[in-house]
Amino acid sequence: MASLPFAHEEYRKRQARLLELIPTDGLVLIPTNPLAIRSNDVSYPFRANSYLLYLCGWADPESVFMARHNGDSWITALFVQPRDTKAEIWEGVRVGAEGASTGWPVDSAYSITDLDKEIREIITDDTEIFTILGLNTDLDSVLEGLKTSDPRKIIDSHRRLKSKREVELMQESAAIATAAHILAIKSTFPGIGEWQIQAIIEGHFAHSHSQWSYPSIVGGGDNATILHYKSNDRVINDGDLVLVDAGCEVEGYASDITRTWPVNGKFTEPQREIYELVLKAELAGIEACQAGSVWHSMHRATSAVLAQGLIDLGILDCSVEEAIGDGGDFNGPYRNFFMHGTGHFLGLDVHDVGGGRQGDEDGGPKLQPGMVLTVEPGLYFGSWRADIEIPERYSGIGVRIEDDVLITDEGPVVLTAKCPKAIDEIEALVGSAR
Ligand SMILES: [Mn+2]
C-alpha cells in the first residue's frame, strides 16, 4: 500500500480549519470524481478529486469524505469501495473500510454501499449540508430536495496557501517537468513530429514515476498560436518555432512550464524580436510577484512591456495607454496578440483554486507567502487569423514563456528556474543530444 504524502497531523489540521467554519449541526459530504468511460468497458485513468486528496489523501474511486459533529467534537469518516474478491482479482486489492479507518486520517470508515443508509440516519430537517453536487449521482439522489451549501470557497482559501511539505512536492514536480523540457529541446530537429516531442516529454514523466497534469501542448509553426492546441499530429518544418506547454504532477501537485524554441536551433530575426519581448514581459511579471501586491499587478507589468514592445516593433500604431485600452481596461488592441491571462494559481489542480481569475474584484487576491502561481505571457500571430491584419514579418509566430513562482517574504522564488529560457542557452541546447 502506498504511503500518504503528508503526515496525518497535516491532514487533520486541514480538516480542522474547514470544520472551524462549519456550524455544529452541519454535515460535510465531499465525493471524489466519477469514473469516466473511454470506450465500452474501458475507463479513462482515474484521478481523485483534489478536495478529497487535500482533506484525507484518499486516491481511489467511489469514495466520499464525511464530517459530522456528535455534540462534543467533529467525527470524520470515509466511505470507500468494500473488499470484494471478484472485483479485486481484476482491479487489484482494495483498502476497504477497515484499512481506511486505520491507515488514513479519519476516525471511521464505511463501505460506499452503505452511503444511503448511513446518511439517512444522520440527516434531520435541520441539518445543514455542505457538499459538492454533480460528482456522485448516488449521493446527489440521497440529498435531493434538501438545501445544500458548497464548502469549496472555504477550502479554497486554505488550499491556495501551501505548506512547507506541499512546496517540496511542487518543487519536485517542477524539477521533473524542467528535465523533460530540457530533454525535448536537446532532441529537437527539423522534421520532427509534434507527437515525438510529446513522447519525449511524457516518456520522461513516466520514467520519473510521474504523469502529465494536463494534456501536453506541442505546437509547431502556426499551431503555436492555438492556445490549447492538443492534436500534436503535425511535422515541424525547418525554420519554425515550436511551443511546448507541458507539466506533470507529484502526489497530485502540478507543475506547468512553457518554452518556445526554433526547431533548427537558430531564431530568425523576427522570431528573436518577438521572443525577446515576451521574455522581457515574463521577467517583469515575475518581478511583480511580491508579497502584499494584488494579483492584477503582474498582469499590469507584463501588459505594459508587451504593449510598449508591440508599438516599438511597429505592430501597433498608438500610445501605450491606447494599446492597453480605454482607462486601462486591458482590452485594447494589444489583446489581439495576447489573449489570455498572465497566470493562475498552481497546486493540486493545474488551474488551482483560490481566485486569480478573470472577474476577480479589486485586482484579485493579495499575494501572500506560500502561494504558488504561474507567470506566462505570450504573443501570437496566427497566419490563419481572419479578423485582424497580421504583419507579414511575424505571420506564423507564437511565443509563450511560463514559469512556476512561489511567493515569499524575500521575493519571488522561481521553482522552474533551471529550465533554460535565455536565447543563447536555448540555441546552444537545441538538437545537442543528437
Ligand atoms: Mn499555465
Image (cartoon, helix red, strand yellow):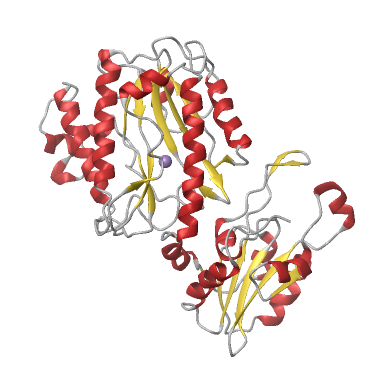
Is 383 placed left or right of 111 in the picture?
left
Which sits in the foreground, 100 or 216? 100
Q: Residue furthest right?
A: 86
Q: Position of residue 203 (x, y in %)?
A: 61, 30
The correct choice, above or below, for 139 with respect to 279 in the image is below
Instruction: Give the residue furthest to the bottom.
Output: 71
**Which quarter of the rendered image does ligand 1 occupy?**
top left
List x then y, in percent, for residue 33.
Answer: 63, 54
Residue 156 location (% of width, % of height):
45, 62
Residue 72 left/right relative to 152: right
Q: Is residue 384 shown to the viewer in this render? A: no
| Residue under the point 26% across and 42% down | 285
Tell me residue 73's x, y (percent). 58, 85
**Residue at left 38%, top 49%?**
373
Foreground of the two, 309 or 427: 427
Inspect this view and state whether residue 142 appears. yes
Look at the picture and state if 343 lies above or below 98: above
Question: Within the image, what quadrant is residue 80 found in?
Answer: bottom right
Count of marks overlaid on the render:
0
Q: Quadrant of the N terminus?
A: bottom right
Residue 116 sits above or below residue 49 on the image: below
- Choose top left, top right, bottom left or bottom right for residue 367: bottom left
